[in-house]
């Protein structure tokens, strides 16, 4: 008998990140991965560099200092926080801990690809619910809940659509779930949201036994390369995550950079202000160019093309030839769309100019 993986593993389509290279281009504008164009805080860079003297030491396996800093900054309970190698790791750990063969993992139809991948990896069945106006639909999600449903992932705001659901909608969703279903709120882009009705998901975590909030340092903090994320969860879920995660799953350099990044509130505010300004500006110029920008609460914008998939693919290729990399999102069921990260002022002006040229 030949060596083979568990059934279903080879049916998984691996996650493919945004492109980072454009052959032949003199300059590459990387707007495909929702990275912070301002980069990390200078304080975080300095803290990271300072750790070079301690590379022979194991990191703090419990990330205690980082958890305390997060708790103080967010007004949370440090004992309810678990840190991970990006929120991707925490997604995978939650699925592995709470779902398996015969179980279902539910999410909205244009939700983050890692929900389905993680479900299949654990042997569970991914189930999607239709969205309304590219937004998670509470009634649609609840209609798909069965006695096999173990988890419901809600990206809020959602990637790649940029949409979000309100505090009232989130609470209605949770109220409609059986206590046996774990609601996981993936709030990777929460810091960018300026809307007054955006939920404070941590409050729901503190009120319920079946809610988890995920956050990341990859977006607003600009530390994507270090793979650092965190979960806020009920005590029982924290206990489970600490049993299944690796003992040293977050590097000491990542913890040090994260600590410094949290403290630099001026850099965070600057990043939010930059994103809000240029997201609005780009929406206007993209519409004038002939694309259809979708409302976004994140650090990116989804553009829909009236010419459908053919036009989206043509624009994607034309922009790449000009050295501008944006994200095709056909894998999310949005073949007629492209996702554009909000970059620097120079990058957004260059992208707008190129978009106007290719859509003439």
Image (cartoon, rainbow, N blue to C red):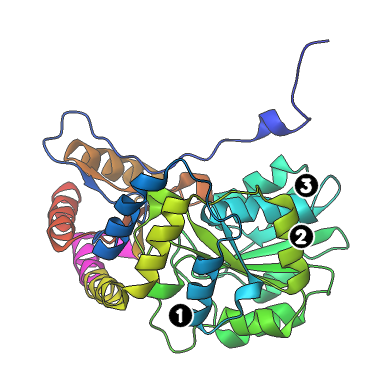
Distance (Cα) linking label 3 and label 1:
36 Å
Residue 294 visible at all: no
What element does badge 1 sit on? helix
Is 64 magenta? The answer is no
Most foreground residue, 28 or 136: 28
Which of disc 1 and disc 3 is earlier in sequence?
1
What is the magenta range? Answer: 281-295
Q: Is residue 66 above or below residue 45?
A: below
User: Could you say where residue 18 lies in the image, as x and y percent from the top left?
Assistant: 38, 44
Residue wearing tag 3 = 124
Q: Is residue 283 magenta?
A: yes
Element under disc 2:
helix
Point out which mark residue 93 bears.
Answer: none
Task: Give the number of the mark in front: 3 or 1.
Answer: 1
The disc label shown at residue 73, or none? 1
Residue 76: x and y in percent read 57, 81
Mark 2 or 3, nearer chain start: 3
How crowded pointer 1 is (Cα within 10 Å; few <14, some 14-19, many 20+) is rated as few
Residue for badge 2: 240
Q: CA distance from mark 1 to mark 2?
A: 25 Å
Mark 3, secondary structure of its residue: loop
């Amino acid at each position: 008998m030949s060596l083979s993986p568990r059934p279903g593993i080879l049916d998984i389509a691996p996650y493919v990140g945004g492109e980072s290279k454009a052959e032949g281009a003199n300059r590459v504008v990387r707007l495909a991965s929702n990275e912070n164009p301002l980069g990390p805080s200078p304080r975080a860079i300095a803290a990271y560099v300072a750790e070079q003297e301690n590379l022979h030491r194991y990191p703090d396996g419990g990330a205690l200092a980082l958890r305390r800093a997060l708790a103080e900054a967010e007004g949370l309970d440090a004992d309810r926080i678990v840190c991970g190698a990006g929120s991707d790791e925490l997604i995978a750990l939650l699925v592995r801990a709470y779902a398996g063969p015969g179980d279902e993992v539910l999410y909205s139809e244009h939700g983050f690809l890692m929900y389905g991948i993680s479900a299949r990896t654990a042997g569970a069945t991914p189930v999607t619910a239709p969205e309304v106006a590219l937004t998670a639909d509470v009634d649609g999600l609840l209609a798909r809940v069965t006695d096999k449903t173990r988890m419901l992932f809600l990206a809020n705001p959602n990637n790649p659509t940029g949409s979000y659901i309100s505090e009232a909608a989130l609470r209605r969703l949770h109220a409609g779930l059986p206590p046996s279903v774990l609601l996981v709120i993936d709030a990777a882009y929460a810091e960018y949201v300026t809307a007054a009705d955006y939920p404070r998901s941590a409050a729901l975590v503190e009120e319920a036994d079946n809610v988890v909030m995920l956050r990341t340092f990859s977006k607003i903090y600009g530390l994507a390369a270090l793979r650092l994320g965190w979960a806020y969860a009920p005590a029982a879920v924290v206990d489970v995550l600490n049993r299944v995660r690796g003992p040293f799953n977050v590097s000491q350099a990542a913890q040090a950079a994260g600590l410094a990044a949290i403290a630099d509130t001026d850099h965070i505010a600057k990043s939010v202000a930059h994103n809000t300004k240029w997201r609005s500006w780009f929406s206007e110029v993209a519409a004038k160019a002939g694309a259809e920008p979708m409302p976004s609460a994140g650090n990116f914008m989804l553009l829909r093309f009236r010419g459908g998939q053919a036009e989206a693919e043509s624009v994607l290729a034309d922009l790449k030839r000009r050295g501008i990399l944006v994200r095709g999102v056909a894998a999310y069921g949005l073949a007629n769309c492209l996702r554009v990260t909000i970059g620097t002022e120079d990058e957004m002006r260059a992208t707008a100019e190129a978009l106007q040229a290719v859509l003439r």
